[in-house]
Image (cartoon, coloured by chain):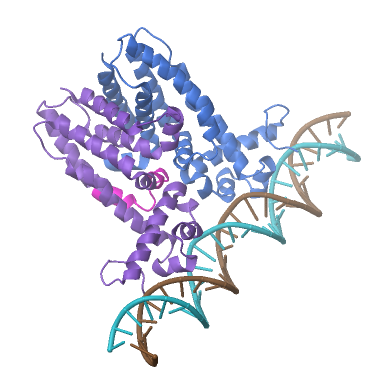
Chain colours: A blue, B purple, C cyan, D brown
Amino acid sequence: MARAESTKGQTRIQREKTEQILEAALGVFANYGFRGSTIDQIAAASGLSKPNILYYFDGKEAIHAVLLNRLLETWLEPLEHMADSDTPIDEICAYVTRKLEMARDFPRESRLFANEVLQGAPRILAELEGPLKELTDKKAALIQTWVDAGKIAPIDPYHLLFSIWATTQHYADFDVQVRTVLGKCNSDCFASAQKHLDHLFRASLAP
Amino acid sequence: MARAESTKGQTRIQREKTEQILEAALGVFANYGFRGSTIDQIAAASGLSKPNILYYFDGKEAIHAVLLNRLLETWLEPLEHMADSDTPIDEICAYVTRKLEMARDFPRESRLFANEVLQGAPRILAELEGPLKELTDKKAALIQTWVDAGKIAPIDPYHLLFSIWATTQHYADFDVQVRTVLGKCNSDCFASAQKHLDHLFRASLAP
DNA sequence: AAGCTACCTGACCAATTGGTCAAGAACTTT
DNA sequence: AAAGTTCTTGACCAATTGGTCAGGTAGCTT
């Protein structure tokens, strides 16, 4: 069977086509959710025929699963990156900025994740309970040490992380609303958002 | 035709059944999105038969439309409520609290809205461009007067509103993620969230 | 260029789903 | 309690959709 799995032992065509399919599927799933997307839509978006897509993937679920797996790595990376520092406020704000840049540069990934979690995370719950929870616990503990050392204001680390996730991803997930409210004259929404969020978190973290 | 519209001239049964259907549909649409929900699901959840549901509503779209219309009123009400005040920081924090209470008490409404906007707001765009934008502009102007008067820190009113919406609705929309990260021992998530958000916005608004 | 393998597709299938309809059941009105 | 209206449903339909398959085409190897 030629079904795509480990990148090992793949032909040129396999690599190209699976990537082409995943690229198209990301856009479709992000916009319509899992149930709202059809293989036909993915076929149209990727320029391949439906049977051809099913030649490379075992089904709709399989495509979605590969996307979600890839997603979580990318998604957690900025948080992994947050480390101990003499200037924890700068460290946290740098994380906010990185997260906001991801919302700007990878809005489809953000929406794919939002769609999944919004509908109860039926296919990604295990990943949330595993890697996500572990990493969050670790980083929350790190933030707590900053609090205990009096380097930042006493703040609940978990709720701080929630606020960061919510505010940054909002610009990707609620993009339509943001653009509508800001109107056409929305020259550099992300630049002003960056300034705003930097102020928001910097002010609330000052000891 | 007996199709439900203005509450005028409805029989007892019409009032009861339409409400029953809408109640069930809210839960279904909130959890699965429009495309992901089926009339059969709504039928099962409401205890009515499919043809019976279609006796009261012109179709799946019609049910969804009624829910969205009702939603926006409820949704905008807390913001309408925000008025000029001698203590604008308290006024804004009261709005945050009210918004968080809504996320707690009406999570299905929040998710219904999130699902819709996330997928490009195909059926509610006009409402966003009309009532939502007008109200937002009005309240942003109000916040701007507070800034100009030096009563609160210089802050972008629109991005402030986005941050409030994002952080509060996060607890309804990403409920699964929040509960997973906080673990079972999540006794009073909303109480601690309230404290956190109050600090977050109060600190960033101090002149 | 022959042969092998990987790749691709039109035609097809079964299940799901939005929606209809005729006819019967239940409620209201007189 | 009869008549008239409203309500309810089993059976049915057409369109959509996830997925299959036999057979043909293109690419690689020798």
Task: Tell whether position A64 is magenta.
Answer: no
Image quadrant where one finds the N terminus of chain B: bottom left
Residue B176, percent across and down?
Answer: 45, 36
Residue A122: percent from the left, percent from the top?
Answer: 53, 40
Q: Is residue B115 magenta?
A: yes
Up/down of B103 relative to B178, above or below: below
Horizontal side of residue A32 vs B142, given as left or right: right
Residue B196 left/right relative to B206? right
Residue name at image x 19 percent, y 45 percent = B80
Residue B144 quadrant: top left
Instruction: Please tell me in which quadrant of the rendered image residue B85 appears.
Output: top left
Question: At x 41% / y 56%, what residue is drawn?
Answer: B24
Residue sitting at x 54%, y 30%: A127
* SS majority, magenta: helix
Query: Which image quarter holds the C terminus of chain B?
Result: top left
Q: Depth check: B180 or A27 in front?
A: B180
**Residues rendered magenta in the picture:** B114-131
Left or right: A11, with A36 as reference point: right
